[in-house]
Image (cartoon, rainbow, N blue to C red):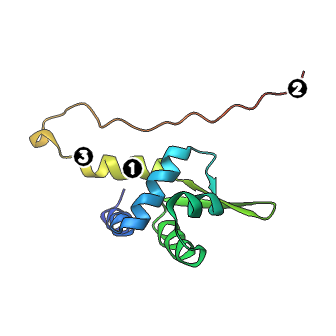
Amino acid sequence: MKKTDAVAALAALAQDNRLDIFRLLVQAGPEGMPAGAVAGALDLAPNTLTFHFDRLRTAGLVTVRREGRSMIYAAQFEQMNALLGFLTENCCGGTPCAPAAECKPARKRTKVPA
């Protein structure tokens, strides 16, 4: 990860609501959550939420997809792991150490009818 990308990601997360949104999306996993569910869970107005989603998307921390009438937002785990790696790459005084744990969420499996 480039320093400019790390700064953009950290700047996007340096706000209470955006940090809460991102953490909720990480908890939701790769499937993400509808914008309305995020708004309800965090008690945020839709227009405020749109502004925060835009900042997180610009920083590469979330993606959005349309499903019917819903906008589904999901955390970008690769970008999150890259940021964690960037922040910890020089730990331990430059001596090689165990890498920071990477988040590799499993996709929810849906039952396929037999």
x, y percent for residue 71: 69, 63
**Label ID, residue 19:** none
Instruction: Out of 111 and 103, give the one closest to the viewer.
Output: 111
Residue under pointer 1: 82
Q: Quadrant of the N terminus?
A: bottom left
x, y percent for residue 85: 32, 46
What separation in Å lies between label 1 and label 2 (alpha carbons)? Answer: 38 Å
Residue under pointer 2: 113
Q: Secondary structure at mark 1?
A: helix
Please indicate whether residue 32 sits to the left or right of residue 5 in the image.
right
Instruction: Out of 40 and 79, give the one closest to the viewer.
Output: 40
Q: Quadrant of the C terminus?
A: top right
Please indicate whether residue 5 sits to the left or right of residue 60 in the image.
left
The three-letter amino acid code for the residue at tag 2 is Pro
Residue, x 78% and y 28% (percent of image)? 111
Q: Secondary structure at mark 3?
A: helix
What separation in Å lies between label 2 and label 3 (alpha carbons)? Answer: 45 Å
Q: Secondary structure at mark 2?
A: loop
Instruction: Please name which of the two marks, 2 or 3, marks the residue nearer to the observer.
Output: 2
Residue under pointer 3: 88
Residue 58 to residue 23: above or below: below
Instruction: Out of 101 and 37, give the one closest to the viewer.
Output: 37
The three-letter amino acid code for the residue at tag 1 is Ala
Q: Earlier in the sequence, mark 3 or mark 1?
A: 1
Q: Earlier in the sequence, mark 1 or mark 2?
A: 1
The three-letter amino acid code for the residue at tag 3 is Thr
x, y percent for residue 107: 62, 36
Please indicate whether residue 68 sits to the left or right of residue 47 in the image.
right
Residue 83 to residue 91: above or below: below
x, y percent for residue 100: 30, 37
